[in-house]
Image: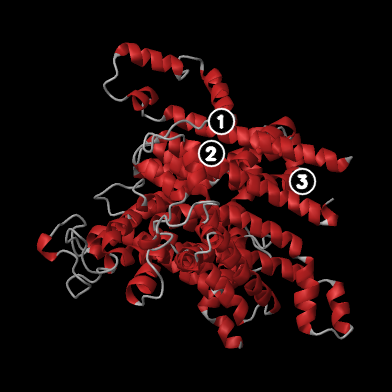
Amino acid sequence: MTARTDTPSAGWRDWLTTDTPQSRAQARLGRAWAGWTAFRRNRLAVAGLLIVLALVVVAALAPVLAPYHPYAQDLNGRLLPPSAAHWLGTDAFGRDILSRLIHGARLTLMIVALVAATAPLAGLVIGTAAGYFGGWVDTVLMRITDIALAFPKLILALAFVAALGPGIENAVIAIAITSWPPYARIARAETLTVRRSDFISAARLQGASSLRIILGHIMPLCIASLIVRTTLDMAGVILTAAGLGFLGLGAQPPLPEWGAMIASGRQYVLEQWWVAAMPGLAIFIVSLGFNLLGDGLRDVLDPKGD
Amino acid sequence: MPTLKRGLTLLVTVAVTLLGLLLVTFLIGRVVPIDPVLSALGDRANADSYAQMRTQLGLDLPLWQQFLRYVGDVLQGDLGTSVLTSRPVLEDVLRVFPATMELATVAVVIGAVLGVPAGVFAATHRGRWPDHAIRLLGLIGHSVPIFWLGLMALLLFYAKLDWAPGPGRVDVFYEGMVDAVTGIVTVDALLAGETDIFWNALQHLVLPSAILGLYSVAYIARMTRGFMLDQLRQEYITTARVKGLSETRVVWRHALGNIAVPLITVIALSYAGLLEGSVLTETVFAWPGLGLYITNSLLSADMNAVLGGTLVVGAVFIALNMLSDLLYRLLDPRAR
């Protein structure tokens, strides 16, 4: 037992797990390490993380990984079943389904990234402002949030896309517009718990402006719960985007968007099932990855919730 | 009179929320790049009739007056005319709505019948494998694209195994054979005494409603588990056990009885979610409900129909949300 603590790896572990950190950086790294060890114990969450990382890698290396060009047609090789040459078969234009799925990962990642970069940010600004200022600002902002929260998301996204015109950018806008309210509620709740804290009063007495207090002291404390919620929501975002694509309102052909690929395989589903089945599996695996990751992150970052 | 005051507050909330919904559909209708005058008159309208129609539709008024006019029209039940069917949108929506309601109702029953016991089971086996399995199944249920699952179910149960009938509400052979009294085919068939058609319609209902219902199983099970865990911690449960009551009775009568009220609100909420979720399911199963109506109208740029349908789904959704809130307050003495 004593021999083990002498190994070099125990050195940095001790440094990370010490209860008397010497610097701010050490304390932060130590907390991150504690979170990671807790996270690592949840095998499903690690599986989720691996799936999400795989999505990023596949998207980044799509041209290298894909055996064929995603638009390369081969009308002699239409609707071929899975084989050694085409692992997942070919579609109605003889395009390799695996290559299209690999390139489609880029679209999925883009949609997820764009929604994750906009909706939670909008919710964060609205929620912290409402919680910090209180009074009529709170009443007005939260009334609007409650109203928006009561709307059916998918139907509203459909109506937005109908107004803006079909396309992947408009699908992203429609999803972002309909998904900010829960983030505002979470951010407000977090703000209310710290608003009356001594460290906020101290900052205010030192002359910090409201903007500075919100940006520097309140927003960082809201981040953890927002990250959890965002990760859990990303599965829903992927499903909504795929649904819009399936209805012909999201990405337009010949873009290899997964939902649109299912729609194009729909008429062959009874005979050439792989055309519709493969993209659906891809959607399922990726959104399961985000769900597992979010579920695990919730246990680590936000033990209060649930 | 705190109850009266609460009721009034709720009423005002509903009114404001509905007004917000109207504002959204109104604004969407204004930013659409489709000219409402041309879609009413056709592309070859001359300048005079164009100007006349423009005035008639109120498009020369300021925006806020247009909105008031729109609210007035909607309150009178005028959602405009569908370009596609050339009938009033409200008439169309009322005709297709029962099909959606039938689907969502059966789906929510399936969701509750499977979800509640699953949640109870997970709570009583907390931290052990049934709990993990149910949690994982829930996550899986929330990760499957519902339209894809529908297609795969058709492939397996209709094409390969021949256990279920194909898309649609009844076989083509039976189409239009019973009068639409309620618009719900199973009920109409029973009213007409046509048991053959009733069984056929029921068979057609199984697959789409099961697919749609699976979506709410996860949510209902998860909430049930949470509520149950809160109850099982309490002292009256210990008392009941000490008194020697069987575990079945403690769990299923005492604990479950006490979470009935929050459960009802959860089920009402998931019912609202299913009405919305039916859009994609209906498309896959060629189910002639509101979802299919909205998507077909979308694809032919029939904006009156799209916005009218959106408004109706939105209003029902909001009403169900508020109703579940109201139910909770009425049924749970602690919330009064």
According to the image, label 1 marks what residue? B74
Q: Nearer the viewer, residue A137 or B300?
A: B300
Q: Chain of mark 3?
A: A
| A257 relative position to B27: left or right | left
Q: Chain of mark 1?
A: B
Of the 4 image quadrants, the one containing the C terminus of chain A is bottom right
Same-subunit check for callouts 3 and 2:
no
Q: Chain of mark 2?
A: B
According to the image, label 3 marks what residue? A197
- Amino acid type at mark 3: Ser
- Amino acid type at mark 1: Val
For marks 3 and 2, give the one nearer the viewer: 2
Q: Are marks 2 and 1 in contact (CB under 8 Å)?
A: yes
Residue A229 percent across, percent down from the top left: 57, 55
Tell me the CA gap for discs 2 and 1: 9 Å
- Amino acid type at mark 2: Leu
Same-subunit check for callouts 2 and 1:
yes
Q: Residue at x 23, y 58 (%)?
A: A63
Tell me the CA gap for discs 3 and 1: 49 Å
| B91 relative position to B218: left or right | left
The structure's colour scheme is secondary structure
Residue density around tag 3, few if under 14, some if 14–19, many if 20 or more, within 10 Å: few
Residue density around tag 2, few if under 14, some if 14–19, many if 20 or more, within 10 Å: many
- Determine the secondary structure under disc 3: loop
Q: Are marks 3 and 1 in contact (CB under 8 Å)?
A: no
